[in-house]
């Protein structure tokens, strides 16, 4: 029997039934690529088009923005004052206002920019999938919670509360409050598990879901969340804090709407966004056309050391800017240092607004005109099934990676919007902890020392010491006494600037501080750290300035420092990492150094753990530094005499610190001649140093000379792959490698000494 084409055609009614069936029976609403890969402003709504086509009053827009800013400040302070998490107390939070379409319009002026930029994505998810879903819906008094970075976020420790704002029955805006909560039920306490080998090790992974109805938290869902984490009290307290801060923000926004009317407020926030986008395009147009590049490197997966490349080429042509990250490291299938492209863009927005154009309002619109290109399945554009619990490693790089190429473009401009500045130290170092407190409570979180990275040197001044975390310019380092009241952590050395660990230059980077910690009055307590940069400098200098040193984790195990201090207090002259590790004043202690990617381990009472925040990069040639500034650093005990003389070539009296100006000029001129004698032509340098592939002994991930060719490893074998066909790297368990090493060692002993060994 012959069947005509017409007989096989699907009728309109049949197609509608099919589409409805597929929509109602979709297996899983995972992260939506259409949402997650789009960082541009949504088109104007009909209301926005109508309002803006009539024109807005610039003075009224300014007045409304000021009132919204005041409302955001109040809600921020509510969370800051009442939040239970360490992140809430020290400013690792934000509150924000979004348009009806979900675009970030304004954030609290003290907040973490990236947290709010990330809420752009889950709000769009809620709008697309839950708004008209009969089992969910969106109505006045609803609140949605979210923490899974795959749906939009920095990492899974950050929890957001999002609420629609209805005015006279109409949805006009979205409001949010986000805190770095810490503990989230992951395989290691504290919420940032370096040991996570799959996304199922990462603890809570909350896609956006409704947890509030009629302004009340649903107790059944709250109980589920509390049952999923180590610290149920924290989960309860901060959900309530975020909810009520968002309700207060809503009250203030409604008062503004009552005063000015819907059209004025909607128009003000939309024009605010569009004005920022227009201004960014204007500033791009000011830049010289061309391409500038920078390569950044991570040296650890937090489980093993290896070099992972993040490559950026910025190309400017007219008012177009393209940020090309192709050629970066491939993703890791069982290491937690991957991130997704949406999170990476949020960190890029943070860096742009903190280090390049800090005068711009903090909105997603600042990034909207910029095209961002990446390789799929790279470490910064990872597949959703890859673990991402320690996504901070590439995200920290994103916060500073703009600094060098953008300053090269900005340097020649007659007007700049910030000082030309070297990179801030980008590995926010702190102790992550977990266990039983002296009060009998189970907890896990992180210490506020994370908020004190050294600033990069500027073109006209030294960098500020330990000024802020790389991800938030207004966060605080906190009060140690409060930490000691809540946890058994005791600071033996707290926030002492790290002598000699400097980003040298004509202007030096700001120093970081040491952190020396132990535990008391708890027999179940442990620490972990989540940083890289222990073997390869993580922060680059600018225009001849030095990079930061490498920093390591140091331990003194097998002792009780409290017994030493009680019985022989004079044995320890000072709590300084270099002194303790070089002089080893405590007999019987097991002194050791490690890279700062330490997975969770137990700490016995009185054992000592030591890490250090790092310095920002230096600016300019060290031989151009004013000798008076060198003497100032020596006088302030930031630098020792031998370093001052060796690095800066200054001749002076060590007792009086009086500089011999003529001898200093002569010494520096002689050293310049020595540099010239050591110099090589470019061709000679390339002939000696440039290789066609990475050294065979180097565990290397990423492109080498061609961004279309990516290097990685499979087991012990190096592999090459096309950038459009990246395979994830699967890493062996370090414990398995250690066991194999010890077994091989045992076999060698048996061969030498017999089976009796």
Image (cartoon, rainbow, N blue to C red):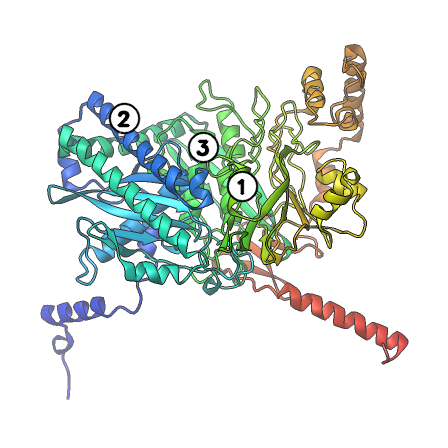
* Location of mark 2 (residue): 66
Classify residue 59 as left or right of residue 118: left
Q: Tag 2 or tag 1, which sits nearer the N-term? A: 2
Q: Which quadrant is home to the C terminus? A: bottom right
Q: Nearer the viewer, residue 669 or 537?
A: 537
* Location of mark 3 (residue): 474
Q: Nearer the viewer, residue 509 or 635?
A: 635
Residue under the point 14% across and 71% down: 17
- x%, y% of residue 152? 37, 51
- x%, y% of residue 622? 69, 24
| Residue at mark 2 to residue at mark 3: CA–CA distance | 19 Å
Residue under the point 70% across and 57% down: 696
Q: Tag 3 or tag 1, which sits nearer the N-term? A: 1
Q: Which quadrant is home to the N terminus? A: bottom left
| Residue at mark 1 to residue at mark 3: CA–CA distance | 13 Å
**SS for dot 1:** helix
The dot on residue 387 is none
Classify residue 650 as left or right of residue 437: right
* Location of mark 1 (residue): 450
């Amino acid at each position: 029997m012959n069947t005509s084409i017409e007989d096989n055609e699907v009728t309109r009614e049949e197609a509608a039934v099919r589409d409805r069936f597929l929509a109602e029976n979709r297996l899983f609403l995972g992260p939506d690529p259409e949402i997650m890969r789009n960082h541009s402003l949504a088109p104007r709504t009909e209301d926005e088009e109508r309002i803006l086509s009539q024109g807005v009053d610039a003075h009224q827009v300014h007045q409304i923005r000021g009132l919204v800013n005041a409302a955001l400040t109040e809600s921020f302070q509510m969370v800051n004052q009442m939040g239970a998490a360490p992140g809430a107390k020290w400013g690792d939070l934000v509150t924000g206002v979004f348009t009806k379409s979900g675009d970030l319009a304004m954030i609290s002026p003290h907040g973490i920019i990236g947290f709010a930029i990330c809420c752009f994505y889950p709000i769009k998810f809620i709008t697309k999938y839950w708004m008209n879903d009969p089992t969910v819906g969106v109505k006045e008094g609803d609140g949605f919670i979210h923490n899974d970075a795959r749906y939009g976020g920095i990492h899974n420790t950050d929890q957001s509360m999002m609420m629609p704002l209805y005015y006279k029955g109409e949805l006009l805006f979205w409001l949010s409050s986000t805190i770095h909560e810490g503990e989230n039920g992951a395989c290691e306490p504290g919420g940032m598990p370096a040991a996570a080998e799959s996304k199922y090790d990462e603890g809570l992974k909350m896609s956006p879901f409704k947890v509030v109805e009629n302004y009340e938290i649903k107790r059944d869902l709250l109980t589920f969340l509390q049952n999923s984490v180590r610290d149920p009290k924290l989960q309860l307290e901060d959900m309530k804090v975020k909810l009520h801060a968002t309700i207060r923000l809503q009250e203030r926004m409604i008062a503004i709407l009552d005063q000015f009317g819907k059209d004025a407020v909607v128009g003000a926030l939309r024009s605010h966004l569009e004005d920022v986008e227009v201004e960014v395009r204007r500033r791009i147009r000011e830049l010289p056309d061309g391409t500038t590049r920078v390569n950044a490197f991570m040296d650890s997966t937090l489980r093993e050391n290896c070099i992972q490349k993040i490559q950026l080429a910025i190309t400017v042509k007219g008012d177009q800017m393209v940020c090309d990250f192709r050629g970066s490291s491939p993703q890791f299938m069982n290491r937690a240092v991957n991130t997704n492209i949406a999170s990476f863009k949020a960190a890029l927005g943070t860096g742009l607004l903190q280090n390049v154009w800090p005068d711009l309002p903090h909105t997603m619109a600042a990034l909207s005109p910029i095209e961002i290109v990446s390789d799929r399945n790279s470490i910064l554009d990872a597949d959703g099934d890859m673990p991402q619990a320690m996504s901070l490693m590439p995200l920290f790089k994103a916060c500073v990676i703009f600094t060098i190429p953008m300053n090269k473009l900005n340097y020649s401009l007659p007007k700049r919007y910030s000082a030309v500045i070297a990179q801030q130290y980008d590995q926010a170092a702190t102790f992550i902890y977990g266990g039983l407190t002296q009060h009998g409570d189970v907890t896990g979180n992180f210490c506020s020392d994370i908020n004190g990275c050294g600033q990069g040197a500027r073109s006209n001044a030294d960098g500020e010491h330990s000024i802020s975390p790389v991800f938030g310019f207004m966060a605080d380092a906190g009060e140690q006494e409060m930490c000691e009241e809540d946890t058994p952590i005791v600071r033996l050395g707290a926030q002492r600037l790290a002598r000699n660990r400097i980003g040298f230059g004509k202007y030096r980077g700001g120093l970081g501080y040491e952190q020396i910690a132990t535990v008391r009055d708890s027999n179940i307590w442990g620490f972990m750290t989540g940083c890289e940069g222990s073997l390869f400098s993580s922060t680059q200098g600018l225009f001849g300035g030095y990079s930061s040193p490498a920093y390591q984790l140091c331990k003194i195990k097998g002792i009780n420092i409290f017994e030493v201090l009680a019985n022989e207090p004079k044995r320890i002259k000072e709590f300084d990492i270099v002194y303790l590790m070089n002089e080893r004043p405590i007999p019987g202690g097991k002194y050791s150094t490690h890279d700062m990617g330490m997975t969770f381990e137990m700490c016995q009472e009185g054992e000592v753990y030591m890490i250090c925040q790092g310095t920002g990069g230096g600016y300019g040639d060290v031989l151009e530094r004013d000798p008076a500034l060198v003497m100032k650093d020596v006088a302030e005990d930031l630098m020792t005499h031998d370093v001052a003389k060796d690095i800066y070539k200054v001749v002076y009296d060590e007792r009086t610190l009086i500089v011999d100006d003529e001898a200093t000029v002569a010494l520096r001129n002689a050293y310049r001649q020595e540099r010239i004698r050591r110099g090589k032509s470019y061709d000679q340098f390339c002939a000696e140093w440039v290789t066609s592939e990475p050294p065979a002994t180097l565990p290397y991930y990423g492109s080498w000379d061609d961004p279309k060719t990516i290097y990685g490893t499979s087991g012990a074998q190096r592999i090459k792959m096309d950038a459009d066909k990246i395979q994830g790297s699967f890493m062996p368990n370090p414990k398995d490698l250690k066991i194999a090493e010890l077994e091989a060692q045992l076999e060698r002993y048996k061969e030498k000494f017999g089976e009796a060994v």
